Amino acid sequence: MTAHLASLAAAHPWVRSAHWDPNREAIIVYPADSALAVRPAPGPLLSEHLEHWRHVYSYVYAAAEQRYGDNLDLSGWRASDTGAPFDRAHMLEWIDHAVRLVLRGEPATVLEVGCGSGLLAHRIHPRTRGYVGLDPAEPAVERLRAQALPGVRVVHAAAHQLTTAPVVEALRSVGATAPDRIVFNSVTQCFPDSAYLTAVLEDALDVVAPGGAVVVGDIRNLASAAAFAHWIEAARHPESTAADLARRAAARLAAEEELLCDPRFFARLADKHARAVRVACHAKPIGADTELTRYRYDVVMTVDGPAPATTRTVVWDQLPGSASGTWPTALATALRDPAVLVTGIPNALLDTQNPAAVTPAQLVTALPPEAAVLLDSADARVLAAGRPEQHAGVEAVNDSGAVELCTDPLARFVRLRLPEVLADHLEQQSRNASVPAIVVAEESVTR
């Protein structure tokens, strides 16, 4: 009977193959590639993962628990360490940083993927000729449409649909054939896996205007994920021993359901693209010490831009005043030269034992307007400062030696969801049989 049930499981359209394993006393299944596909259209398992997040955000936006007004809906923004809503002033600073990053270079038209309630749209549209926002959550789309912001079009669409006819028509309606900016701000953590992220970003890089940029904001950093997990558990369980904290942090990391990306993922993607793409990884130079400032970062991928200048590197510990804390004047003076990149700056948020360390927020106060605080290490423990448009990229973040560049939420989802679907399928196909355990082969989902 078990062999018969395995053959019934193998016949399901979401399954490539299945067999009975007597040692594990379970049916071992391998998902069909078509069930996990991104193109030409999302497969059913990938679609269910996307649908899960659509439901989550539809509920969040409909509930509007932290809605202060049309231009400030902070529903869902809660700190992982306390569970409390983020401070409103902190979130306003977070929004302002995101807006400045998008408007850097004064784009005429902006396409935002995952526009949500319009945190960025309200602040971007007055300074552009046209703005198009996409979101899969209907309550957010309906609410933003109803506000009828000048020069703004909102489309009910997911990230993988950014090249479809409704989006193209919306761009044309605001006078654009190709947007100058394509923005993904605080949305990639809901993507199924690196294959989906790659497909969507390749679309964006294909269609953005020459000299324009794809801005991927508020990315959860895989390179610092272990430190983040430990930080959360230490905040929630301050009485724990070091061994207990390590155990709790490891369990939290293993149970992670969101997509986390190493900054080097974007450099590798850029290297493979047909167009000339330059990547800059930005730290978040905002004041409060939260997970948003410690463990998230932003990426700007400039497409077919002018060739960068020859970089002249100044190392932080060679900068006058770096050890004594009197560095702001020296840093500002050094960065008057557009070719200068100051590297090796210890990040005080993550390197708490280094007396020469400074925070991104402290750094930004001394920078000329054209300069930015960048990552000089994938885990953000080391920072750099300079004009991102002038440099080919920070070597430490361009390093392609990392093996694991993204987590795999889809694999975890499939291991839970596919056995449920197949158990229902087998019960319907063989009503008198007892359905045994069903296990998705570990190696079968990873791509």
Image (cartoon, helix red, strand yellow):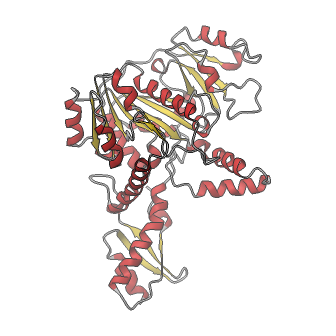
Corner quadrant of residue 248 = bottom right
**x, y (%) of residue 364?**
59, 20
**x, y (%) of residue 145?**
29, 38
Residue found 55% across the figure and 26% down from its top: 374
Camera-nearest residue between 87 and 342: 87
Which quadrant holds the C terminus? bottom left
Camera-nearest residue between 194 and 172: 172
Which quadrant holds the N terminus? bottom left
Residue found 50% across the figure and 26% down from its top: 393
270 relative to 128, above or below: below
The answer to whether residue 117 is left or right of residue 330 is: left
Total labels: the figure holds: 0
4 relative to 423, above or below: below
The answer to whether residue 155 is left or right of residue 442 is: left
**x, y (%) of residue 287?**
62, 28
316 relative to 11, above or below: above
**x, y (%) of residue 259?**
49, 49
Residue found 71% across the figure and 33% down from its top: 351
Camera-nearest residue between 429 and 34: 429
Camera-nearest residue between 35 and 423: 423
Residue found 36% across the figure and 70% down from its top: 15
Corner quadrant of residue 254 = bottom right
